[in-house]
Image (cartoon, grey):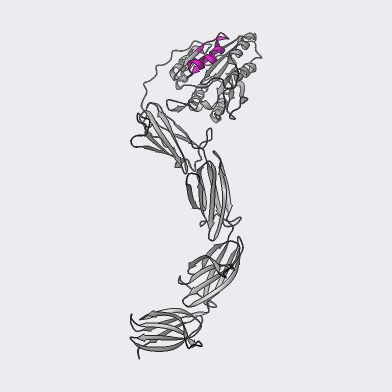
Amino acid sequence: MRLFKILAVAFFGPAFLAAPALAEGKSIIVLDASGSMWGQIEGRAKLEIAREALASVLSGIPADTELGLMAYGHREKGSCEDIELVVPPAAGTAQAITDAANAMKFLGKTPLTESVRRAAAELKSSEAKATVILITDGIETCEADPCALGTELEASGVDFTAHVVGFGLTEEEGKAVACLAENTGGKYIPASDAGQLVDALKTTVVVAEPEPEPAPEPEPVALAENVDPVAYLVEGGAELDERIIQDVVFSFTALGADGTPAGDATTIYGTSKGSLAPGKYRMVTELHKARVEQDVEIGPTSYLSTPVAVLDAGVLNLTLRAAPGADPDPDAFWELRGAEELYESGYSKAYRVFPSGEHALKAVLGAAEASQSVVIEAGKVTDLDLVIGVGLAVVEATYAEGVKVEGGDHFVEIFAAQKDIDGNRKSVGYTYGAEAKFDLPAGDYFAVVSLGAAKAEVPFTVKVGERVDLVAPLNAGVAAFSFGDGNTYLEVFGSQKDINGNRTSFGYGYGPNWQSTFPAGDYVAMVDFAGTKTETPFTVKAGERLELTITKP
């Protein structure tokens, strides 16, 4: 007679490696992938222990073992219909089952009754003996009756027996599932830790050959690093992207007798491990602007504790461009604000983690600004390619045609062409020096260039994504004076007097040397030599330099 087994697995302890081999015949493992598997035993998530143990057991089974995998609660939250035969029973499926378990998310409810029913139905084609071993860390959550199922299967005429191992269940919870075993002539065995779970498995697993004597377990050896914290953006989500995983900071502070943190903190960064004494700790996990605080327990130093932090956060993948199709602009500035005084800023591009929710984003490039709301979803990457919408204006100044103004002495200011109600134009940017560059929104403007007493104004238009090069002709030259000493005063006036007999002042300075730029034309240099004043007429030509030496008469 062939033996058929259904293994409904909710948790495996590390010592499950010593469990007996599977019996001959077809088998189905029913894997509990409910959300309760995120609970911890001795500092480790139960789902991680389950995966490791399952992989170890399956790696040692004979290649001709006909094995399948059924799972529940692994695809969606809150559904009692989330049950799937992931790997149909067949020979050589060990690696496929291992891979499926490793990729599985632990999300949903615990429809254990319906899962056992479907597994039994899958093997019902044979009249051979069928045995189910249910190892569960939770009770039925889908309004089904495991007791009634046990009675139903026993009365079906199939040679069926169910054994139930209740891992970490209270006495009342145990009664809720023990009847499944009792109604089919099986056993209910409670287990409160990994060791008891192993003993329960050895008691309930029926094998074709006698169980070998277990090898003596070695004494636990303390690990040099016994803490390996893990962070997820969302519960059941994927591992952190390699671009951000090294930025995670885990801070552990021991809890005092009153449950509050006391003493210095121990910090672990990124994928590194650390060393902590066994006990309870306040763990603070930070990744960019996401932060979560929780209490965790670190197990014995001979075990690797892997406390898990869920940040409830997402990633903003931001790129700022001046115009459509342009490269990311290194001068484009962004800032993001959110609830509870959240603030972050930077330039050009960003790949940053933020708490889930709605945030306000502002981007600035030159005189242009763009704002919008950004919704960050937990566990997701929000890709945002933001075009600020500017063109580039480049302003050069000349003394005369073909004679550029070099250096950084001249002042360049950009005004909006449209005047306000008072007749004034709004200044939108300014700078000093040659080849002055301005990022501007589309529109009409004036560039005003000033150097000494010379000034030029040039109108222009900006289009998004285009460059406009401007030349501001000052029609001016330079006059350089040598005169007196540091106390000697010189002032330049226009040569023509107004109707009142006054002349316009174009600038002044002190000896012994002074120079400035003047529009082309005729002038008079008035020098005060300690009370003795002289006037020297001179002419400035565009694009030329004039040097004058003025002496005391």
Residue 486 % position (x, y): 33, 80
Q: Nearer the viewer, residue 120 or 67?
A: 120
Q: Hey, which quadrant is residue 458 in on the image?
A: bottom right
Q: Which residues are magenta?
A: 163-188
Count of marks, rendered view: 0
Q: Nearer the viewer, residue 519 or 407?
A: 519
Residue depicted at x 55% and y 23% = 32
Quadrant of the image containing the C terminus = bottom left
Asked whether residue 360 is drawn in magenta, I would say: no
Farthest residue, direction bottom: 553
Residue depicted at x 48% and y 48% = 343
**Residue 20, can we see it?**
no
- Residue 175 lies, with reference to residue 330, above or below; the image says above
Residue 373 % position (x, y): 57, 48
Farthest residue, direction right: 125
Quadrant of the image containing the N terminus = top right
Asked whether residue 165 is drawn in magenta, I would say: yes
**Residue 289, can we see it?**
yes
Q: Hey, which quadrant is residue 460 in on the image?
A: bottom right
- Residue 143 lies, with reference to residue 345, above or below; the image says above
Residue 293 % position (x, y): 44, 36
Q: Nearer the viewer, residue 193 or 371?
A: 371
Residue depicted at x 43% and y 18% = 195
Residue 62 % position (x, y): 54, 19
Q: Nearer the viewer, residue 183 or 351?
A: 183
- Residue 29 lies, with reference to residue 516, above or below; the image says above
